[in-house]
Image (tube, coloured by chain):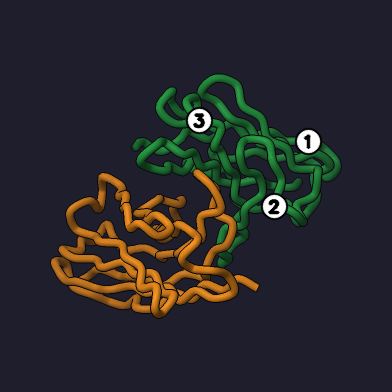
Chain colours: A orange, B green
Amino acid sequence: EVQLLESGGGLVQPGGSLRLSCAASGFTFSNYAMIWVRQAPGKGLEWVSAIAASYGTTYYADSVRGRFTISKDFSKDTLFLQMNSLRAEDTALYYCAKIYSSGTFDDWGQGTLVTVSS
Amino acid sequence: QSALAQPRSVSGSPGQSVTISCTGTSSDVGGYNYVSWYQQHPGKAPKLMIYDVTKRPSGVPDRFSGSKSGNTASLTISGLQAADEADYYCCSYGGTYNVFGTGTEVTVL
């Protein structure tokens, strides 16, 4: 059974940093691309970032490019999202998900909440 | 990377059919056959319902179907049931990005 467990969320001040983790199990982590998707309170889903299966190619939404960095640790089967220069509009529930194929995310975690506020 | 346009809400009685549209551009919806649909119940993670425009993952009822014409994709729910009441989001691959729709609330009357 595929399991994705996010952690690392919390309350941070504007301009601060936070690193989210997504521990993966139940599948061969190195064979799959992964993504981060966020959902602001009461709002819709927003694609944030993606990383290729094994070569490390990364992609970012315009809203986070230059501030967020996605990465994978194959020794720990863990996906990361390093978030710097955080803004109030980054407040959201952050989900990690496994990419089955282009544009298809077949397994999701339960999310970790990030709140950016002074 | 503008969000795909979906109707804010649709509704139907049990047993009826509802269709949700998802309009993008030639750079995303119209340019690739990589449109997916997700169901999200309150407080829950999204669930994949349709992928590659028309395909259903194992376990998703055949009451759910997808289609596409030009820059607009659609999700049809036939034989509407109370359990189908949820938010639905489309998503399209755009080459170097993915973009979600604005979301549609489905209400079963």
Q: Which mark is first along the chain, 2 or 1?
A: 1
**Which residue corresponds to the image point at 34% horizontal and 37% vertical from the top-left?**
B1
Three-letter code for the amino acid on which mark 1 is drawn:
Ser
- Residue A114 falls in which quadrant of the image? bottom left
Disc 3 element? loop
Q: Is residue A108 left or right of residue A91?
A: right
Mark 2 sits on what residue? B85
Residue at 58 percent across and 30 percent down: it is: B73
Q: Amino acid at mark 3?
A: Tyr
Which residue has dot 1 on it?
B17
Which chain does the numbered disc 2 sit on? B
Camera-side residue of B79 and A7: A7
Crowding near the residue tagged with mark 3, few <14, some 14–19, many ≥20 C-alpha atoms within 10 Å: some
Q: Is residue B87 above or below residue B34?
A: below
- Residue hosting label 3: B32
C-alpha gap between disc 1 and disc 3: 27 Å
